[in-house]
Amino acid sequence: MRDRDLGERTFSHGTSITTQLSTLLKNVTMHARQRGYEEKKIGRRHITSNLQWHRNVGIIDFMQIAGHRSRIGEMMLRKSVSERLKSPEGLSYSEFSYQLIQAMDYWHLFSNLGVRLQIGGSDQWGNITAGCDLINKMVNEAAWIDDQPTPSLIKSITKPYGLTVPLLTTQSGEKFSKSTGAGNIWISPNKTPPFALYQYLLNRPDEVMEQWLKYFTLLPLPEIAEIINQQKESPEKRPAQKKLAYEMISLLHGAAIANKCIETTTIFFGSDEPGSAEQRRLKLQAGLDKSDIKGVSPRPFWEPVLAESIMGLPLEKALVAGGVSPSNSQARTLLKSGAVSIGPHLRQIKLADEKIILTPEDLIDENILLIKVGKNKLHIIRLQTPESMKVALEEKEDPEWAMDPSREAKPDPKTPGQKKSIRRREKKATAQARLAAKVAAKRTARNLEQEKIRAEGQLLGEQEHDFTNLLQKALDREEAKALRQRGAGKVIADQVKFEGLELDRKPKSS
């Protein structure tokens, strides 16, 4: 990257990460106090960026400090290097040198801030030990230490340490990572909504509960043991999953949001807690509103769909457009199973041979369609006009930008990748608009045909209205307003023919 791009990216990403870590450490400190941890053992925090010192280190300085103190043989034996060398992609020199850059980080933190322990995932073992080796060599070579009365004592006191923790893996053994796709779970609420993370934790298998409670909570070990015993006695109540989900959301996002997740889960999926069933019944009877939907996920995470492409049409089309089902046939099978509930009252759909038509009564606040599938899946569709679709797609693609209260209009694309992304979004919006127009045109033509059939029972001279009134009657149906806004009414009028008589804007006199 150029220096300017590197600085901008470091600032934007660094600010986000700093905010996340500050919030996390603040919540951890509060929980530690509440659980009786000694205040003096909590320590202090300092968040910094290695760009601050690497920017001022030249290649000669880097070679003098880290270059001649490192051995190629040791670097080649490290797992992070050996595995990449065997891969088809190979290993670039910059990637090979990464362990030395991280070693320089540890040396800087050690010599300037007194850091003596570096913690990382188990895949960071080679990089951490590279830092320990560099620090030991720098300390042993320091001439001033040998001049002190107790040089051996000073060297033993100033030893660096490394600590690695096991990586989370799926049941198949694949690690959770943004690169592997095994599970993209983010601390940032702009990437993973708290409710989505809460549901994810709530549905983890029993086998990992004891391990995850020890990893991710500050609960005392005796309390964790008691929770696991309750889990074994009543696994259907999921006490361990509930405790894990609440504790993690509290640490990451605060107790208020954790309580909101519990409340929202009770409304949508029910609960075995006393009184929760009646609370859910009353809420659904009154109807859900936009605030309840926001408790599930913020607006950028809702699926944008053109209103004209699903309103007044069979419900399976909404399931396909919203990404709930990949095809109409699978959506219809899902509807027939009775696993789908929609609308502000979560009306259960029991589809027989007739088709269920999506109506305005199924919407929340006139433009939100809520779809619940099974026991624990929610989908939110936000209906769009052709004019608002472009902005909605931008929000969907970049939730962090959409949720930034100080956001400004996105700058014009600069790189080929950005331009390609813009073209792809515009192509998608255009295709959806064309589909909606095609569906609306077919619907209008069908209405006109029905009017024609009803008029065929009368003689032409006995009709009380001319073809202009006939057309107007058809266009006054539900879709007339949307069609006139796009100017589609004129196009259809110019093309309609009745019994060989062409209908123009000014009908010919008989």
Image (cartoon, rainbow, N blue to C red):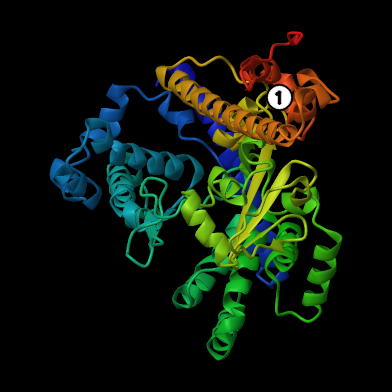
Image location of residue 211, percent across then percent down? 47, 73
Image location of residue 37, percent across then percent down? 65, 70
Q: Nearer the viewer, residue 251 or 269?
A: 269
Q: Amino acid at mark 1?
A: Leu
Residue projecting furthest to the bottom: 233
Q: Nearer the viewer, residue 354 or 499?
A: 499
> Image point 50% across, 22% down: which residue?
422
> Image point 71% across, 32% down: which residue?
456
Q: Nearer the viewer, residue 247 or 221?
A: 247
Image height of 338 relative to 56, above or below: below
Regarding residue 343, the answer to whether it shows in the image is yes
Regarding residue 45, the answer to whether it shows in the image is no
Image height of 42 relative to 58, above or below: below
Q: Is residue 289 left or right of residue 74?
A: right
> Image point 79% across, 69% down: which residue?
280
Image location of residue 198, percent across then percent down? 61, 61
Image height of 428 relative to 221, above or below: above
Quadrant placement of the C terminus: top right
Badge 1 density bin: few <14, some 14–19, many ≥20, Cα 10 Å? many
Q: Is residue 485 left or right of residue 139?
A: right
Q: Nearer the viewer, residue 413 or 43?
A: 413
Question: Disc 1 on helix, strand or loop?
Answer: helix
Residue bearing mark 1: 483
Image location of residue 39, percent across then percent down? 68, 64
Q: Is residue 429 left or right of residue 26?
A: left
